[in-house]
Amino acid sequence: MNTACPATPRILLRKTNLDKPLWEKLFMDIPYIVKPREDTGLYNAKVGIWLFLASEVMLFGALFSSYILLRVGAAAGTWPHGLLNVALGTINTLVLICSSVTVVMSWASLKLGNFGRYRIYQSITLLCALTFLGIKSVEYHDKFNHYEVIQTDGRIVDGHLVERTKDFDLAKKTGAVTLLGHFVEKTEAGAHEATAKHAEHSNITIPVAQIKKMENYGPWHSTYLAIYFTLTGLHALHVFAGAAVIFVIWGPLAGLWKTDPARYTNRIEISGLFWHFVDLVWIFLFPVLYLL
Amino acid sequence: MQPTTHALPHPGVLESHHEELSFWRKYIFATDHKVIGIQYGITGLSFLFFGFCLVALMRWQLAYPGASIPVIGGSLNAILGDAMMNKSPQGGYFMAAELYNAFGAMHGTIMVFLAIVPLAFAAFGNLIVPLQIGAADMAFPRINMASYQAYFMGGVIMLVSFFIPGGAAQAGWTSYSPLASIIATDGQTFWLIGMVFLITSSLLGAVNFIATIIQLRAPGMTWMRLPFFCWAQFVTAFLLLLAFPPLEAAAVMQLMDKVAHTSFFLPTGLVIAGKAAEISGGGSPLLWQHLFWFLGHPEVYVLILPAMGIVCEIIANNTRKPIWGYKSLVYSVLVIGFLSFIVWAHHMYLTGMGTKISTFFQTTTMIISVPSVIILTCLFLSLWGGSIRFNTPMLFALAFLPMFGIGGLTGLPLGFNFSDIHLHDTYYIIAHFHYIVAPGTIFGLFAGIYYWFPKVTGRTMSEHLGKIHFWGSLIFMNLVFLPMFAQGMAGLGRRMYDGGATYANSAETIGIPLDMIHRNVSISHAAWALGLAQIPFIFNFFWSLKHGKKVTSDNHWGSTTLEWQTPTPPPHGNFLKPPVVYRGPYEYSVPGHAQDFTPQNQP
């Protein structure tokens, strides 16, 4: 075989390349970046994102399966209910559904050639993402502020932190802590969360000397909270990543709309598919963690 | 995109970059699939060597428990610290139990995740698949680069973990909880973070390979004209894509157990060193095993399928006749891919998960041996009536067949749960899976290196040295692993720090014959000899890069597949003109043709 390159087509292509940035020149040679391949009907990135989402299904699928196994394996009566704020969860669900609509509308706007409307829709998407993450951090904060104190007399106080005295120190056994909460009726061994909603809440001050164990409702508190923080944390990371991608395309990379609108629109489609997946995960997370 | 490029059916193949890329762009932050393949290859081979060195040291401890390590004992102590090495009363240093455990865990991890998968899947896949399907590059070159970088980072984290206080992970490559979670050192945390990087790398690679094979096949390259190597890589990519995420989930959860003190895998009432653990409890150790082996078993096929693909290419080429049963091969590999997802719990017969579940997984395990046997049979039958060229790649490919056969057949007693009870966790299982991966997959990889070296470098490797390498490897591989079957059947456990010497004095009560324990010495000698047998290869590899005989033709072996229909080495963009495929992949010795091979792109 002749190893020398024919010269003409090379020169021809380089001329058309001269006004392009280097990284784009590097990827010139791959077909179906914008136009779909005839037999598959898809462009490359669309195949890629669907495959990636398949692996994401397996990732979250494994975590949901773990949730089922842990819950089925829990001793009777120990799986907590009603720990989370259903109202906030519902608002977050609505926020994400709303963002899914705006993502579709932004893509449709680009298909119609209306760049301005695309930007408005997509900024609503970004606002929704921020709202979601904001509400999520309020919920997290609430859990980290929520304490269970086992007293030396065996009684359990459950409530939110109001204040600690300045000399509060669990190791030195000095000071006191005030919780807005109630005494749990059952003792150490039994479950109690279900009754928490109906109990009268009041400020309870406990001297540290009377505290046997004090622990907040972090992931270390129970298997339920462990899977709650892991699942929602991983999901929040996905929301953040999706929003970051949408923002980068919305702002810094918007120049592509002028030079290659079809490719720009494809990017919105790809990031939109990811965004819908992230929403869908939440649609499963919400009932599983908040309602069941 | 400029309309000019749309007008051409396959624009990229005409395009090549004549502005010289800087060293960094070309070799470090490369996006060209061939450069990335070479990056994977060099890194993977280095890890293969490193993983072997770990086990070579462990073999000293197994053969001569408590004897100080000659020559390098002092330097090991200086590098790894006093906690990892014990001072011998006769002077010198020998391995502490913690170090033995760390080496054992890291040997497995490095060989599987840092050596074999990157070599078999990523290196050969990157180098060969785009060429064989007639593509200009992978579908997502920058993701390809990110994939290599994630792999590299994962490798660095694994290596760094040897030098942190307490050393590397010690709970075996399977990292069973609670053991993995309760060892107080940070080795396991490093292992988990390293694994997250490696898994990410595999995912990015898998997405890229599947998209490339679906989208970038040259015109005329229909599915049934795809070389079997590409099919094997395609199925492998699906296994990685779908089996790895559950391990990623498991790694995240074990990481939470380590750093956020959750109890995903820690049961209620766990007692550590006589004290009740301060944990919330409620977790399930079995859950880790399910998630781990959900990856772990498909991973076995990730290790073997690419090697089968390589062997198939080489056998077709060197028998000069079409492969026997191409369609059976393709359907078998697809069935293997599917079934490998529902056999995982045959690693868990002894966990007490229940007889019904055991029966199910025993059944699926027996079924999956059917397509494996079909593949092996097709390859054997392909030899029938061929006028075989016994060159180095072909020798390795031929040796692959019986070696994989031994590995596969000895797996059957492990697949039955009644016989597995006796063999579980003994040297028998070590021998079984090493027959699959060492004289199996690694022979396939060697075959591939000798076979494609002329295409990648433009020079051939020495046949003489290659044959010395082959015979040395074949003999010593068997001397290492064959006796282990006997040891295992005699009941020698696989994770013993002293190779069973503790039981030597009470061999009668334990029931392990003394000669089985003494066999550790000859096995260790064979293992070190196996290391020496690689010197001809290492020398040959580097010497041939500069001084090997230059190839006289672009198609050095007279092959039909597209990777040989390019310039040598292929330029950026691979093909001089867009290839069009007219025929199947193995049209050798077609009657009435002038040559004994008809390339796929010949009309």
Image (tube, grey):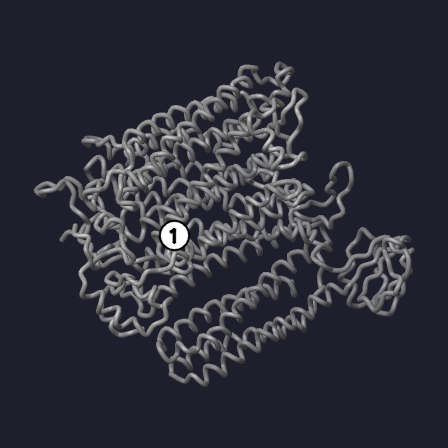
Q: In the structure shown, which secondary structural element does the residue marked by tag 1 occupy?
A: helix
Q: Is residue B598 left or right of residue B1?
A: left
Which quarter of the image is occupied by the N terminus of chain B? bottom left
Q: Is residue B236 visible?
A: no
Label 1 sits on what residue type? Answer: Ile
Compare residues A266 and B396 and report the one nearer the observer: B396
Q: Is residue A124 above or below residue B252?
A: below
Residue B502 falls in image quadrant:
top right
Which residue bears the numbered disc 1? B36
Image x and y of residue B40, in percent? 41, 48
Compare residues B469 and A88 and report the one nearer the observer: B469
Quick one: label 1, few (<14), some, or many (20+) residues within 10 Å?
Answer: many
Give the number of marks: 1
Image x and y of residue B206, in percent? 41, 53
Q: Is residue B17 visible?
A: yes
Residue A46 falls in image quadrant:
bottom left
- Write the residue at 41% across / 44% down: B42
Image x and y of residue B334, in percent? 36, 47
Q: Is residue B81 above or below residue B603?
A: above
- Write the residue at 33% across / 27% down: B468
Q: Is residue B38 left or right of residue A166?
A: left
Compare residues B127 and A262 and report the one nearer the observer: B127
Image x and y of residue B263, in percent? 68, 50
Q: Chain of mark 1?
A: B
